Structures are given as structure tokens and as C-alpha cells.
Image: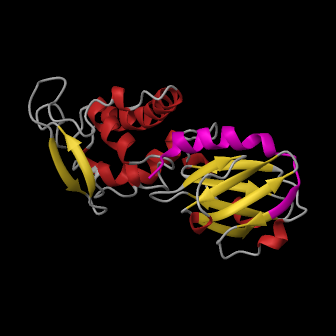
Amino acid sequence: MPEGPTIVLMKEDLRKYVGEKVVSAAGKAKIDKDELVGKILKEIRLYGKQTYLIFDDVSVRIHLLMFGSYEVDEQTKPDKSLQLGLTFKKGKMFFYTCSVKMIDNEILKTIDWTADVMSDDWDPKNAKKKMKAEPAMMVCDALMDQDLFSGVGNIIKNEVLFRIGVHPESLVSNLPTKKLNDLLKEARNYSFDFLKWKRTDELKKHWQIYYKKKCPKCGEDVIRKDTGKGKRSSFFCEKDQKLY
């Protein structure tokens, strides 16, 4: 599943269409595509892994899910996987194998934009407050909770926990204050590192624990285990990541 930094890159590719009018709309998404024709794209806004194409009185929410993708200007993938294609006077945007929903712009007012770890609106104090309200939650689940850390995915989760030396099955209530603050800080820091490495196609080169066999610190075997309520894969070193 594409994580927040990848969606930021997508926004950068799409933003040249802001201010442009939709000439035509196509694709398999079950929305009223004709309603978009003639409307001007006012803004593109992100909430973690979700992209909002904002028009005058309606928005289109795009979520790439596990295997979604996008293209700009040229369609190279078959129509059977095209969920939404928008044509503008100066180009096109295509979204494949993804979730597409049309929503009323009033819904945008209900979103907690402060939960997006890559946004200028990110508020770690708010995230900390929400975490403390779930003391029995494992930190692996907390990091993957999009209401707490919107945009964080499994790569970021694993790398952040290795950076701060915390076992993924640690409970929120057991984390020392310093470790909790480190988690909040590194969730954002690593997301921007991810973005930097993704730009230069060097992300995998910088993985420390994700899909590694040996711990880069001590040389011990890396444990791979499905953890938390979500049963997502965690990679960790039992020696260098403490269970709280």
C-alpha cells in the first residue's frame, strides 16, 4: 500500500492541473462522472494516504489501496483497471485499481487534518492525547491507526520503532515519556526521510530493519511476526528493541 510520502509525490505530479477545467471524465468508478465535466479543480489536498480533488461544491476522494497507481498525461494501462480518468485542456490524470468516491465538500470540515504526519497542520500533542486515551493499544497498532498517524504505513512503522528501540508489541501505557515523544517525533522525521529517498529511488537502500535478515546494530537474527490487531508484518530485533 502506498504510504503518505508516495502520495505527496503524486500530488506534486498532479498539481499542474489546479485551476484547470475538466473537459471529460471516464473510468469504471461508480460515481456521476458527468457531474465533474466543466468543473474547475480548485485544490488538491492530502490526508495521509487519501487524496482529495476539490472542486467548487464537490470533491473526489482517491485512495490507492494496496495496489493502486496513477499516471499523468498518457494512459499506458488498460481500461479494465482504470477507475477514473480526467481530461483537462492541457493534459490528463489517470487512477487505476483504487477507491474513488465523490463527497460533499462539507465533509472536508469534519476531517482532523492535524493527524497527517506530513502536513504543516500536524499536531503531535493531539496525537499524544489520542494515544493516551488508548492505553492498552500496542504501539504497532497505534502507528498504523490513520486517526492518529495519517499517512504512516508498514514500512514507516517498522523503521520508526527500530530507530527508537521499541518492540512493536509494547503497550502505549507502558512507554516512558521520552520514548513516547521519540515515537511522535520520528513518525514525522522518517516520513520526510522516506520522501527524500523516494525522490531519488533509494528508499530500499536505507531500510534498517524492514525485510532484513540480520540486525544492523548487533548482528542478531531479525524477527518477523504478524503483530497487533491488524496482524501486519513486524520486523524487529529482540535485543535492540525493548518490550515495554
Q: Quadrant of the C terminus?
A: top left
- Pick whichever, 56 or 175, lies toward us: 56
Residue 235 placed where, x, y %?
22, 43
Residue 94 visible in the picture = yes
Tell me if 131 is positioned left or right of 172 in this view: right
Q: Is residue 24 above or below residue 166?
A: below
Looking at the image, which is closer to me, 132 or 165?
165
Dividing the picture into quarters, in which one does residue 204 lie?
top left
Residue 100 picture quarter: bottom right
Q: Is residue 20 magenta?
A: yes
Q: Residue at x 91, y 62 (%)?
A: 38
- Magenta-tinted stretch: 1-24
Residue 23 percent location from the top left of the image: 87, 59
Q: Is residue 79 magenta?
A: no
Question: Could you tell me which residue is drawn at 17 percent across and 47 percent down?
Answer: 224
The quarter holding residue 217 reads top left
Image vertical order of residue 45 relative to residue 166, above or below: below
Question: Can residue 117 be seen at all in this image of the molecule?
Answer: no
